[in-house]
Amino acid sequence: MSSVDTTPAPRLVELSAADLRAHLGEALAVYVEAMDYPKGTEIHRAPMWEEHTTRPGWRGIAAYRSPGDGAEATERPGASLIGIAYGYRGAPHQWWHQQVREGMRRAGADPHTMESILGNYFELTELHVSPRAQGHGTGAALLTALLADRPEARVLLSTPEVPHEDNRAWRLYRRLGFTDVVRHFRFSGDSRPFAVLGRALPLRPSTTGPTGARP
């Protein structure tokens, strides 16, 4: 007997910088839960997330579990934020850019290759879905909505290394065509190995785009 997933699709909302700052506590709660970080991590991350909203090209998308159907879902965004994604245009003066450039240099990339990858990119800074809402396509919906119509030539991200690339994040990135830029790289101040992945833009647009309604 086959089963059918009847979980309703999340409602995606494009955020302004002011929106994210207003709902920063909810977004960081999803982040801490998704990353399994200790409670209190959000206090230290909040200033960084706020600063990121001031960077050129910043864009954010939130996923909500709608409280109902029809007009109710349209008029009331709902109290249940289940996913958050944001990023901005990469630039040479940014710490992440400098770290990735150094990682590529150590891996033997030549200057032309580094420039072709780092010359014009969108940094996917955060993409998180509450564990209670994973497995229903929310991550893919957030990612494709975030990258829709971006003017940059490519998108780059970093994600922790895991054995055999065996988690939801890795499967999502590979399914959407992300390839290796740097593997087993350690960012300054973090002992964990990370992979830097990237792919050319545009990305296939999501079939369920953001509503434009404010949270």
Image: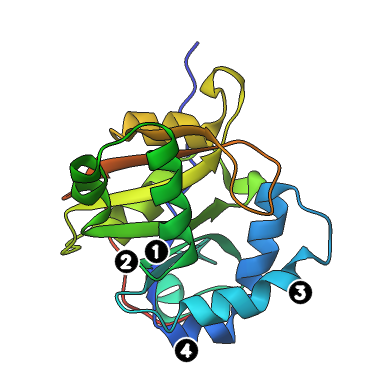
Q: Which picture quadrant has residue 16?
A: bottom left
Amino acid tagged 1 = Leu
Q: Residue at x 28, y 60 (%)?
A: 209
Q: Nearer the viewer, residue 188 or 108?
A: 108
Amino acid tagged 4 = Ala
Q: Nearer the viewer, residue 207 or 14?
A: 14
User: Outermost residue toward the right?
Assistant: 39
Q: Residue at x 32, y 66 (%)?
A: 210
Give the spatial CA distance, label 2 vs label 4: 17 Å
Name the residue carrying label 1. 12
Name the residue carrying label 2. 210
Mark 1 or mark 4, earlier in chain: 1
Of the residues tagged 1 and 3, which is closer to the observer? 3
Q: Which picture quadrant has residue 191?
A: top right
Circle 1 sits in a helix, a strand or a loop, which is it?
strand
Q: Residues at badges 1 and 2 in contact (C-beta under 8 Å)?
A: yes
How many other residues sit within 10 Å of disc 4, few (<14), some (14-19) or many (≥20)? few
Name the residue carrying label 4. 18
Give the spatial CA distance, label 1 vs label 3: 26 Å
Name the residue carrying label 3. 43
Q: Which color scheme is applied? A: rainbow
- Place of residue 182 in the rendered image (x, y in percent of width and height, measured from the top left): 42, 35
Q: Which picture quadrant has residue 75?
A: bottom left
Q: Nearer the viewer, residue 97 or 196?
A: 97
How many other residues sit within 10 Å of disc 2, few (<14), some (14-19) or many (≥20)? many
Mark 2 or mark 3, earlier in chain: 3
Of the residues tagged 4 and 3, which is closer to the observer? 3
Relative horizontal placement of residue 13, taking residue 119 as reference (left or right)? right
